[in-house]
Amino acid sequence: MRTLIKNIKELVQVERQPKLRAQGKEMAQMETVKEAYLLVEDGIIRAFGPMSEWNGTADHEVNATGRMVFPSFCDSHTHLVYANSRELEFVDKIRGLSYEEIAKRGGGILNSAKATAAASEDELYDIAQQRLEEVMRLGTGAIEIKSGYGLTTESELKLLRVIRRLKENSPLTIKSNFLGAHGIPMEYRGHQEDYVDLVINEMIPKVADEGLANFIDVFCDQGFFTVEDTARILEAGIKYGMKPKIHANEMAVSGGVQVGVKYGAISVDHLEQMGDTEIECLKGSETMPTILPGCAFFLNLPLSPARKMIDAGLPVAMASDYNPGTAPSNNMQLILSMACIRYRLTPEEAFNATTLNTAYAMGVSRELGSIAVGKKANFYITKPIPSYAYMPYSFGENKVERIFLNGVEV
């Protein structure tokens, strides 16, 4: 099946020599083709270029006159499978309670863990599938989903099985992440090393036995898991073939960046608390620093120094952190806008941060994250818009009109 998208006003973020990620000054570079065509065959991008050069045939044609085409967003950090919303905690925050104070009294992650334990796998799957449809309509074509709202072996496995079902039934590219070390259950307060032992000796082997996770993650931060805890958990996950990721430096300079780099983490995420030492540590590494603007916005946290990181030659990715407690938005168009408005990235840098670099942070940038021959045909066609800068500029509307995943309109 050959599908031709023709008369494209502007085909954005094309790569003629694909790279795995964009870093430093490369992030400001973004090639486009005006008055373009895009040819898709069997789910793969086969050709693109100026419309004046098209002289082939296609089984199906889509006229994109007046519209632009972009590669789908890749959202490399979400907690999409959860049972309950947490708007009551939202009100507590307005009244002055901190995230840590809410967590200490059994709210936060523990609140979601309690609701998750009470929900059936089918219930969790049905609501998660609805959320996936929402993110797809907003232009996301690939997503990483973490567990972490279980905090018991049974519940963590239940969450990961839901993610596996989503992978099997959704056109989105989905990666799964085991985050058993997301919070410390109340019964382990004061002796959290016993919970770390449970994660290492019971949870990880069972997750691996069922092949449920691509990644292993740890919330390495003040009030959560220590650098020592994190190292033990990552070492155990690596032995079972899980690639490390890290929640790092959200609440404090925790050492999470350093331990992530040491163990070859594909990404270190959050990074609201970053100094020169952390930036130097990331230089020359294969680890993608990933910023979560929605969380910083929702919790009114300090902004990660994205501009300083890019100017130091680092790559930067930006993901949604979609979850019920600290970032209840699944909209990557909004993250694109925040990248420009709050972090002062140019539109070109923001697109690289939410597509190619987030694809890298999921381990899929060889097949996703840009318009390139041989890559998977995940892209969207916009409504009529004046320029690609309009995408981050107009943060209050959905600019996506038509969605193609694996070369098929959905």
Image (spheres, rainbow, N blue to C red):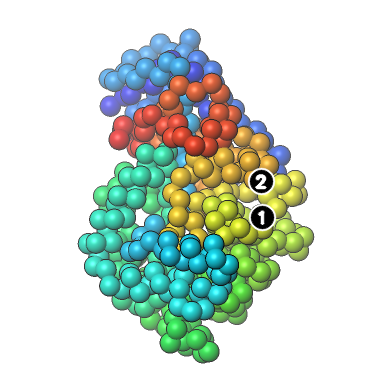
**Location of residue 328 in the rendering, given as x and y in whole percent from the top left corner:** 45, 55
**Location of residue 223 in the rendering, given as x and y in whole percent from the top left corner:** 58, 77
Reply above or below: 164 against 190: above
Amino acid carrying label 2: it is Tyr
Local packing at callout 2 (Cα closer than 10 Å; few below 14, some 14-19, many 20+) is some
252 or 297, which is in the foreground?
297
Answer with left or right where residue 122 lies relative to residue 242. Answer: left
Task: Residue at 36% x, 60% y: name it.
Answer: 81
In the rendered image, the residue lying farthest to the front is: 95
Of the numbered discs 2 and 1, the one sitting upstream in the chain is 1
Residue 343 marker: 2
Residue 38 marker: none
**Location of residue 166 in the rendering, given as x and y in whole percent from the top left corner:** 30, 54
User: Which residue carries the number 1 mark?
Assistant: 304
**Location of residue 345 in the rendering, given as x and y in whole percent from the top left corner:** 66, 40
Reply above or below: 175 against 38: below
Reply above or below: 221 against 278: below
Amino acid carrying label 1: it is Ser
Marks 2 and 1 in Cβ contact (< 8 Å):
yes
Reply above or below: 305 against 247: above
Residue 352 seen: no
Local packing at callout 1 (Cα closer than 10 Å; few below 14, some 14-19, many 20+) is many
328 or 7, which is in the foreground?
328
Quadrant assignment, res 399: top left
Give the quarter of the figure containing the C terminus: top left
Quadrant assignment, res 198: bottom left
User: SS at mark 2?
Assistant: loop
Task: Residue at 44% x, 81% y: name it.
Answer: 185
Quadrant assignment, res 261: bottom right
